[in-house]
């Protein structure tokens, strides 16, 4: 079955690194995504990783994928107050019409 | 700005009514996806269209229907509305099915 889980809340200080974790259950995932949602706004694509990769770095963002444990993480370096938002991980499964299955979202609060 | 547009931004209506939500995909994108975001269900996939044809259905109620027109814009029709249909409705587009999905700003539907 398809189930994506995330912790609900993370609080960090400005300048620290943030690590948001996600677990998924479907081993046939093709892509795994991280989206950011600010209050009252839509979903902004942050980054994604193909399922045969272990790591992807994009400026302050680092995505790590552990396929054995079905664990995905997003690390944000030098976290800023503007990073405060809800972060969703999502998996895309080719055999399921490539729909995205989302986690419940992690609310990141960055304290000055 | 993702390049995906949705109208209207907000919609307030009464139970039993019917509404139409509109989505214009990014230029060149052939796939349109619809998602519902509610407090109790989170983000859920509703339906996927590719180049005018329905490709996949998710947790979409029978009271809901969608279509994609020759100019590739899509409409989501919600009828016999209930209080529980109040949610944010997002559309996303991608070049082809399975490609990265870019989300619009959403339509917030309130059913009174």
Image: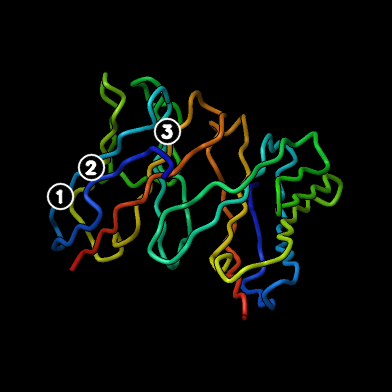
**Circle 1 sits on which residue?**
B18
Which numbered marker is on residue B84? none
* Residue at (44, 67) in percent of width and height: B40
Q: Residue B48, relative to residue B13: is it above or below?
A: above
Position of residue A23 measured from the top left corner of the image (x, y, whole percent): 72, 56
Would residue A23 appear left or right of A36 to someone viewing this image?
right
Would residue A75 appear left or right of B30 to someone viewing this image?
right
A64 or A15, which is in the foreground? A15
* Residue at (71, 52) in percent of width and height: A61
* Residue at (72, 35) in percent of width and height: A50
* CA gap, disc 2 and disc 3: 14 Å
Q: Chain of mark 1?
A: B
| Nearest to N terminus: mark 2 or mark 3 | 3
Which numbered marker is on residue B48? 3
Position of residue B59 measured from the top left corner of the image (x, y, whole percent): 43, 46
SS category of the residue bearing label 1: loop
Q: Quadrant of residue A9?
A: bottom right
Which numbered marker is on residue B77? 2
């Amino acid at each position: 079955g398809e189930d994506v889980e995330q912790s609900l809340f993370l609080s960090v200080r400005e300048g620290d690194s943030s690590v948001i974790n996600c677990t998924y259950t479907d081993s046939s995932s093709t892509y795994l995504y991280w989206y950011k949602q600010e209050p009252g706004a839509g979903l902004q694509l942050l980054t994604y990783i193909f399922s045969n990769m272990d790591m992807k770095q994009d400026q302050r963002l680092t995505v790590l994928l552990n396929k054995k444990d079905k664990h995905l993480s997003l690390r944000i370096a030098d976290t800023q107050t503007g990073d405060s938002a809800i972060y969703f991980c999502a998996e895309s499964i080719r055999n399921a019409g490539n729909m995205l299955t989302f986690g419940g979202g992690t609310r990141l609060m960055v304290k000055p | 700005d993702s390049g995906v547009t949705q109208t209207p931004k907000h919609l307030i209506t009464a139970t039993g009514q019917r509404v139409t939500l509109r989505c214009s995909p990014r230029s060149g994108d052939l796939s349109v996806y619809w998602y519902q975001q509610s407090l109790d269900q989170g983000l859920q996939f509703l339906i996927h269209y590719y180049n005018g044809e329905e490709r996949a259905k998710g947790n979409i109620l029978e009271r809901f229907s969608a279509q994609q027109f020759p100019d590739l814009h899509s409409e989501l029709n919600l009828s016999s509305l209930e209080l529980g249909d109040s949610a944010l409705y997002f559309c996303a587009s991608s070049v082809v099915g399975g490609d990265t999905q870019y989300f619009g700003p959403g339509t917030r539907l309130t059913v009174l």
